[in-house]
């Protein structure tokens, strides 16, 4: 009888050893998906893009996202401009991930 209780206890522990990691992994994946499925604020993205340039004298970003097809994929993007002491640039940044997609000297 004692061994039956011990076996039940071990089986219950094994269930928790499987269930808890599954719950943790599911939570991490859900958090990451939510983060990538939420558009970031354009001003936050502008500040991130500015870190790629030196001697910035001015910048602006359009707050209305637009759809852009590139390489067969549709992305939601923000467009903006950056003025430096030497040159001016137009950029596009992914509205969800913040990835700098394109920079063109204007």
Image (cartoon, rainbow, N blue to C red):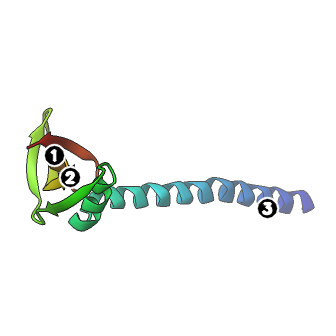
Residue lying at 25% horizontally and 46% vertically, measured from the top left: 100
Badge 1 density bin: few <14, some 14–19, many ≥20, Cα 10 Å: few
Q: Mark 2 or 3, which is nearer the eye?
A: 2
Q: Quadrant of the C terminus?
A: top left
Mark identifier at residue 87:
1
Residue lying at 55% horizontally and 59% vertically, measured from the top left: 24
The residue most toward the front is 85
| Residue of label 2 | 84
From where the camera sits, is residue 29 visible?
yes
First in sequence, mark 2 or 3: give its number: 3
Residue lying at 84% horizontally and 63% vertically, measured from the top left: 5
Q: Position of residue 39 (x, y in %)?
A: 24, 62
Residue lying at 79% horizontally and 61% vertically, measured from the top left: 9
From where the camera sits, is residue 96 visible?
no
Q: Are marks 2 and 1 in contact (CB under 8 Å)?
A: yes
Badge 2 density bin: few <14, some 14–19, many ≥20, Cα 10 Å: some
First in sequence, mark 3 or 1: give its number: 3
Q: Say which of 16 and 2 sits in front.
A: 16
Q: Quadrant of the N terminus?
A: bottom right
Q: Say which of 66 and 21 sits in front.
A: 66
For the residues marked 2 and 3, what is the alpha-carbon distance in whole angstroms?
Answer: 68 Å
Answer with left or right where residue 20 lies relative to residue 99: right
């Amino acid at each position: 009888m004692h061994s039956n209780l011990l076996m039940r206890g071990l089986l219950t522990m094994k269930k928790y050893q499987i269930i808890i990691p599954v719950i943790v992994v599911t939570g991490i994946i859900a958090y990451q998906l939510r983060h990538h499925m939420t558009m970031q604020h354009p001003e936050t993205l502008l500040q991130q893009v500015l870190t790629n340039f030196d001697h910035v004298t001015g910048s602006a970003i359009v707050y209305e996202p637009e759809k852009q097809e590139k390489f067969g994929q549709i992305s939601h993007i923000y467009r903006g401009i950056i003025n430096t002491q030497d040159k001016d640039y137009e950029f596009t940044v992914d509205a969800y991930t913040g990835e700098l997609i394109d920079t063109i000297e204007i």
